[in-house]
Image (cartoon, helix red, strand yellow):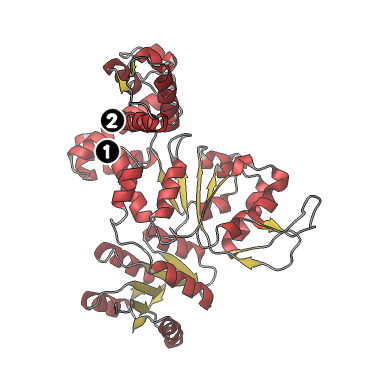
């Protein structure tokens, strides 16, 4: 018989500790309770735990300090924060620090049981690495960093905003976060927010009752209900109209939805992941996107690099695509002529990985003798990189992007050479540490 999971409870209120102990005991879990930060740290050194529940306010510190302490020393232990009702900023800070999830007081026992069940399914750090490596190809520094972040975010319930250009693989990243996390056995429901007609949006998201409007010929569950227990991925979330943004914000805050034509609200348990290729800060400034919704969705931002930022990955990506095309056609795999490979490496790929796949599929069909020549690629000359055009300024289609890429390359090189010691990298580039930190944040490398 396997040992019962052990849970550490940290709260200075005896009534809360007793409530948690009774509830967890009925779930066949062993509990250890302490009232302050110091006792929790001492107990962590002596016992191995599967989960920690901590109050935010402790007599000798904060639950946030405990989250950080456990992240540094016992990263395999998920931590859930218990906060006062309405302390959203505190909860968000806890999620950013690495907390698995949070509860508000008074504690809802149904929600508590759901959280604990989910937390006990969290994979150990690194368990997902092999699967992520197999699905997310490339060994460049940006991709190694992305895989590491996916592995960490899969162990959390924090909302994640996935930013990146069109075709860079944002939905794949969202799927990996879902598949490597505790909700993997539950639905992953992707929705393209820009593809739903505005008049059908409320019905699509929240569902409707039969007869609630013209054309509602049967009861229909919405996307939130379809994703219950799992993950709802809102792709191109910036395309939501403002009226729908208000309703979405309420559903996320209250964790309930109400179908059209129904008075009763339904509790839903979903993790929200979202993505867009647009600049949400600019959308907020233009008053096309609500700032309060942005803060709920963008608890943690994960940036997917463009293909231009990881040109070293083009060769293994191309090889993988050609093998897949050969497998689906039942024919031998085509090979890339060295000049064709060089042309791919010097192309800007505004459509990123999706465009690379389309280019190779077309070339695979057109090429002769199973060798793809540079001419088979039919690449647009105007999208050559400055490096591939031998510094011909007429080939630089966007000076700002070009300079950003040069800056990013130099920063990554300095960080790599100093083993990611930011202070040493800043000195190597004759930058102040503050300037270095600003540039890393601006380029999405922090």
Query: Does residue 260 show up?
Result: yes
Residue for point 40% across, 68% down: 119
Give me the residue at 68% from left, 48% from top.
201
Residue 208's quadrant in the figure? bottom right
Chain-order first, disc 2 or disc 1: 1
Instruction: Inspect this view and state whether residue 35 appears.
Output: no
| Residue at which label 2 appears | 312
Question: Along the horizontal axis of the image, is 312 left or right of 84?
Answer: left
Q: Is residue 144 left or right of residue 168?
A: left
Residue 67: x %, y % from top left: 34, 66
Label 2 CA crowd tier, 10 Å (few <14, some 14–19, many 20+) = some
Marks 1 and 2: in contact by CB < 8 Å? Answer: yes
Residue found 39% across the figure and 74% down from its top: 53
Q: In the orientation shown, which residue stands out farthest toward the front?
A: 330
Q: Quadrant of the N terminus?
A: bottom left
Nearer to me, 433 or 227: 227
Q: Is residue 323 above or below residue 367?
A: below
Left or right of residue 28: residue 226:
right
Residue 304: assigned label: none
- Give the residue number, with chain letter if any, for mark 1: 139
> 80 and 427: which one is in front?
80
Residue 269 at x, y percent in the picture: 54, 64
Q: CA distance from mark 2 to mark 1?
A: 8 Å
Instruction: From this view, report whether residue 231 is shown above or below residue 307.
Output: below
Q: Position of residue 223 (x, y in %)?
A: 60, 54
Q: Secondary structure at mark 2?
A: helix
| Residue drawn at point x = 57 percent, y = 50 percent | 291
Q: Position of residue 253 (x, y in %)?
A: 57, 62
């Amino acid at each position: 018989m396997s040992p019962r999971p052990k849970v550490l409870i940290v709260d200075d209120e005896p009534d809360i500790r007793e409530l948690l102990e009774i509830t967890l005991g009925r779930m066949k879990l062993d509990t250890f309770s302490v009232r302050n930060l110091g006792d929790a740290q001492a107990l962590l050194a002596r016992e191995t735990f599967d989960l920690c529940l901590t109050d935010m306010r402790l007599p000798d510190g904060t639950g946030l300090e405990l989250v950080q302490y456990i992240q540094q020393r016992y990263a395999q232990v998920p931590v859930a924060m218990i906060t006062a009702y309405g302390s959203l900023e505190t909860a968000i800070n806890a999620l950013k620090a690495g907390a698995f999830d949070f509860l508000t007081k008074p504690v809802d026992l149904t929600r508590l049981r759901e959280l604990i069940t989910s937390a006990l399914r969290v994979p150990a750090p690194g368990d997902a690495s092999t699967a992520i490596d197999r699905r997310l190809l490339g060994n460049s520094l940006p991709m190694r960093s992305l895989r590491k972040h996916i592995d960490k975010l899969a162990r959390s319930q924090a909302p994640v905003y996935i930013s990146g250009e069109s075709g860079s693989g944002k939905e794949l990243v969202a799927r990996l976060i879902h598949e490597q996390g505790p909700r993997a056995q539950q639905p992953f429901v992707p929705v393209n927010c820009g593809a739903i007609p505005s008049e059908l949006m409320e019905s699509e998201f929240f569902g409707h009752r039969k007869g609630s409007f013209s054309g509602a010929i049967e009861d229909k569950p919405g996307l939130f209900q379809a994703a219950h227990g799992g993950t709802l991925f809102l792709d191109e979330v910036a395309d939501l109209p403002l009226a729908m943004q208000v309703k979405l914000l309420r559903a996320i805050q209250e964790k309930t939805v109400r179908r059209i034509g129904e008075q009763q609200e339904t509790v839903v348990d979903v993790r929200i992941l979202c993505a867009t290729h647009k600049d949400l800060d600019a959308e907020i400034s233009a008053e096309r996107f609500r700032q309060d919704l942005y803060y709920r969705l963008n608890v943690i931002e994960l940036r997917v690099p463009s293909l231009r930022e990881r040109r070293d990955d083009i060769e293994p990506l191309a090889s993988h695509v050609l093998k897949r095309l050969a497998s689906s056609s039942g024919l031998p795999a085509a090979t890339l002529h060295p000049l064709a490979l060089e042309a791919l490496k010097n192309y800007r790929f505004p459509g990123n990985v999706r465009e690379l796949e389309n280019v190779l599929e077309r070339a695979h069909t057109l090429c002769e003798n199973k060798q793809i020549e540079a001419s088979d690629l039919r690449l647009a000359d105007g999208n050559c990189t400055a490096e591939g055009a031998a510094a011909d300024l007429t080939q630089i289609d966007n000076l700002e992007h070009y300079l950003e890429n040069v800056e990013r390359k130099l920063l990554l090189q300095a960080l790599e050479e100093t083993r990611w010691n930011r202070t040493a990298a800043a000195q190597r580039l004759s930058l102040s540490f503050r300037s270095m930190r600003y540039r890393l944040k601006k380029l999405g490398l922090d």
